[in-house]
Image (cartoon, rainbow, N blue to C red):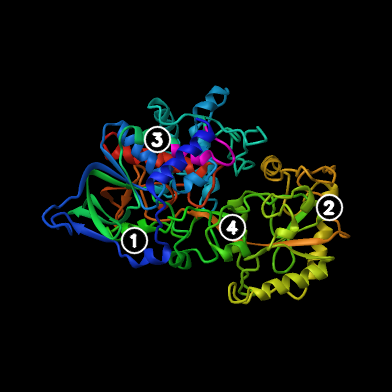
Amino acid sequence: MSNDNQDNNLSRRKLLIGAGLVAGAASTLGLASSVLAAGEKSAKGDQAWDMETDIVCVGSGAAACSAAVTATSLGAKVIVVEKMPMPGGTTGKSGGVTWIPNNKFIAANGAQDKREDCLRYMARYAYPEMYAANSETLGLPQDVFQMLEAFYDNGSKMVEWMEKIDAMHFRQFKMWDVDTAPPDYGDHLAENKLNNMRAMEPASGASSAGGGNSLAYQLEQWLTKRDVPFLLEHRAVGLIKDGERVIGLEVENAGKILRIHARKGVIFGTGGYSHNVELVRLHQPGLYGACAAGGSTGDFIGIAQQAGAKMGPLGTAWRTPVVLEQALENRALPHGVFFAPGDSMIHVNKYGKRVMNEKRNYNDRTRAHFTFDPVNAEYPNRFMFMVFDDRTLDRYAGALPLPLDKRESKWLIEGSNPQELTANIKKRLQSLTGKIGNLSLSDDFAQNLDASIERYNKFAEAGRDEDFDRGLHEYDRIWNKLFSPVSKNATFPANDKPNPTMYPIDRKSTLYAVILAPGALDTNAGPAINPYAQVLSAKGEPITGLYGAGNCIASPSGPAYLGAGGTIGLAMTFGYLAARHAVGQA
C-alpha cells in the first residue's frame, strides 16, 4: 500500500464519517460512568439491548484493534466502539514501531533472544529499585514478574498470528533515513544481551511520518473487509453486569444512550488520560502537555472503578520533554522534544548547572525533571534550559525545538553572552508568571551557566563527558544521527571532534535558549490486569468479562520504555491476549 493511496483512503473515509467534534476533557468529567444490572431496561423502553455481539472492543488504536482482529479471526462477532470521529487513536500519530522480544527476525539473523536474558533486561530496566539477579522472580513481586513473562512468551506469537491471518506483516525496523537497527533504550545495561534486534515496523506504509498511521489503518481495513462495525463518535460511559460478570457496555452518541450486549467480553484499549486535566493534576503534577490523540481523557479509569477494579500505579507515563511555551498555548502537542538536537548544546537547570546526559532517550531524560531537593524543598530541574550557539541553530535548523528561521520562533530566547541570555530568560519567565508559579532563576545562574559551558567545552575537545557520559554509549551516537539531521542550508562545518555528539559552544557567538518542560506521549497508568489482560477487582481477582490493554491500564513494563516501539509492542500483545482469553482460547 502506498502512502498516497493510504492518505486518499483516509481522506475519503473522513468525508464519509463527517467531521463531528468530540467533547474535551472538561465536559468528559461531567458525564458520570455507571454500572447497570442486567435486568434494567434501556431508555427506549421494553428492549433491554440495542445491539448484541460476542465482544466489544473500546478504542481503535493498536490495543483495541489487535484485540478486535484476533477475536474476529477466531470466529467471534465483534463491534468496535470509538468516541472520536476517526479511528486510529494515538497509534495513528506514532511511528508505528513495534518492540517484540524473540521475534522471527532475530533467529533469521542467526541470533537468540533467550528468555532468561530478556526477562533480566526488562526487570532490571523497569524496576531497578527491586531488581535482584539471584531471585527466582528477579526481585519483583510475582504478579509483576508474570506480566513481563507474558510479554516475552506471547509477543512473537501475536506477530505470527497477525501474519498468518494476513492482518499485518512486519519487517525489521531500520531507523528512517539512517538505515541502522536501533539500539534499545537501555542499550548499555549489562543485562541487555541482545541490543538492536527487537524493533519491527509495518512491512508496508512505514515511514517516519506515517508508520503508525499505516499500522492502525491496516488493522482497521482488515476488520472493515470482514464487516466488523466501527461505531465512531460513540463514547463508552458504563458497564453492564450480571452479578460479578461484565456482560455489556453503555455508550453515548448524540445525547442518546445505547446498550450493547457483549456475550464474551468487553475489551478496553482507550488510551491514557494525558488530556484529562483533573486526573493529570491528581496523579501527574508537572505534565505540561502530551502528544496523545485528543480522546486520551482516561475514561476507563472511572468506568473500571465503578465496576470495582483495582488500580495499578497511576503516576506513570511514556514521557518526553516538551517546549514549555508551546504546551502553555495548547496541551495537545504534535511532537515532543524526543531527542535534543545539536552538538554545541547543553541543558541546565534553574541554577545554570548541567544535571544529565542530554542525548539519552526521551522517557528517561524527562524523569530528571522530577528530582527533589530536600534542603531547599524544591524541584530545581522542573524546567530545563536548552542552551546552544549559532552553530547548532544553523547546522541543525528545523529539528525540534530549533526553528528553520529564528525569526519565526516564539520560543527562542537569545543573548550576546551568558549574562545577557540570563537576563532575557528571567524576563521570559516573568512574563509567564501565573502559568508556571513563581519559578525564577538563581542569583548565580549566569555565573554557573558560564562555568557549565566552559566545563562542557573541555569535555567536547577531549571527546569524553566526565560528568554524564554523553556520547559514550551506542544509543547516544546512533539516535543522534536520526534526530540531528544536518540542514541542507547549513554553513557551519561538520563535527571534527572525537565525540560526534559534542562540540564546543562558541563563547563569542550569540547564545540561545529554549525552555523545556516535562510532558508525555501519553500516560500508561490505570486499572491492574493479569497476564491474560483481565482487569482485576479490588480483591485481586479477575473481573469476568472485562479486559484492558494499551495505555489505559497499568503498564506491564512499569515506567520503562524498553526500546523503540515499546508502547505498541505491549499494546498489541496484551490486546491479542485479551481476545484469546475472551473467546476461550487463552
Sequence-wise first label, 4 or 1: 1
Q: Position of residue 43 (x, y in %)?
A: 18, 59
Could you tell me how far apart the alpha carbons at marks 2 and 3 are, in whole angstroms?
Answer: 51 Å
**What residue sits right under mark 4 in the picture?**
367
- Number of on-image labels: 4
**What residue sits right under mark 2 in the picture?**
504
Q: Quick check: 273 left or right of 109?
A: left
> What kind of element bears circle 2?
loop
Which numbered tag is attached to residue 10? none
Amino acid type of the residue tagged 3 in the rendering: Gln
214 within the magenta span: yes
Q: Can residue 504 be seen in this view?
A: yes
**What residue sits right under mark 1 in the picture?**
302
Q: Position of residue 432 (x, y in %)?
A: 63, 73
**What residue sits right under mark 3 in the picture?**
221
Amino acid type of the residue tagged 4 in the rendering: Arg
Amino acid type of the residue tagged 1 in the rendering: Gly
Sequence-wise first label, 2 or 3: 3
